[in-house]
Image (tube, rainbow, N blue to C red):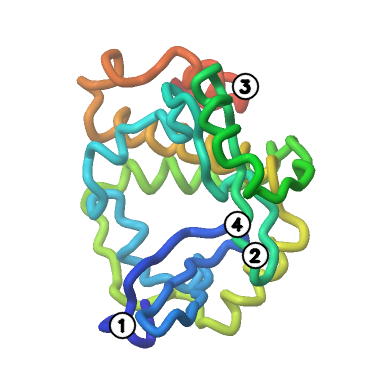
Amino acid sequence: MSKSPDTACHMEFMQDFRIHIRHLDGSIEKVPFFSLPEELSNPAIFPSACMSCFDYLNSLADITVGYIGAELKPKQKRQWILVRTETGQKLLKLIEAELERFPESGKWECRSFVENTTKRIIESMKERDKEYSSKSRIPLWLGNLLAGALGMIGPKGVGFAHYSVDFHLIRHYYYLKFRHPERIEKLVPRHVRVILEEYGLPL
């Protein structure tokens, strides 16, 4: 995946539809999602605990900090902050003077983008015996074109957060449904079924 895997020290799936890989010298390598090796789309390579998690935003935390709902700006590391409790508000006040604030960006609506991925999600969870290639199906130049196009027309800011949360809830529901159905009643929160019904997806 990386041109220099021996120096890669951190990676993150980012809002520009690319993986950002940080290297030991501080440089950032960007690989579009579409050009990742096919084998990385195999659900079986991820820990079952991760694929069974429905708390994508750490909902029991007093405060959650992450990039998911922040606007992606060159040479900036903006974060999106969710304060849920009085304790969280007190924690935020401790560092408030050091923060630079920005208005929330993006539009909440992301339905069409979620719907465009649901069929692929469901099929990938059903395919337990499929063989995955270690090569990418899409060359980097084309992957970058696709990522650039989605970066312009796709969900941004809070819309990207909405898309990411719904995408993962749907993916993880069907992971359990087709691979560990005995765990559904114990692990799937009620609101997940409501979201599936909103998208017209089968339970």
Which mark lies nearer to you, 4 or 1? 1
Amino acid at the residue labelled 3: Glu
Q: Residues within 10 Å of mark 1 (few under 14, many from 20)?
A: some
Q: Nearer the viewer, mark 4 or mark 2?
A: 2
Does the residue at mark 4 contact the one at mark 2 (Cβ under 8 Å)?
A: no
Residue that appears at 70% across and 47% down: 157
Depth check, mark 2 against mark 1: the one in front is: 2
Q: Secondary structure at mark 4?
A: loop
Q: How far apart in space, not on screen, are marks 4 and 2 (Cα)? A: 13 Å
Q: Which residue is mark 2?
A: 76
- For disc 4, the marked residue is 15
146 w.r.t. 42: above or below: below
Is tag 3's residue or tag 1's residue first in the polypeptide sequence? 1
Assign a secondary structure to mark 2.
loop
Mark 3 → mark 1, Cα distance in angstroms: 44 Å
Please state the horizontal and vertical placement of residue 75, each as a whole percent of the image.
64, 71
Q: Which mark is residue 198?
A: 3
Q: CA distance from mark 2 to mark 3?
A: 35 Å
Residue 161 as seen in the image, left or right of residue 35:
right
Number of the label disc, if any, that sits on residue 7: 1
The nearer-to-camera label among 4 and 3 is 4
Residue appearing at x 60%, y 79% in the figure: 142
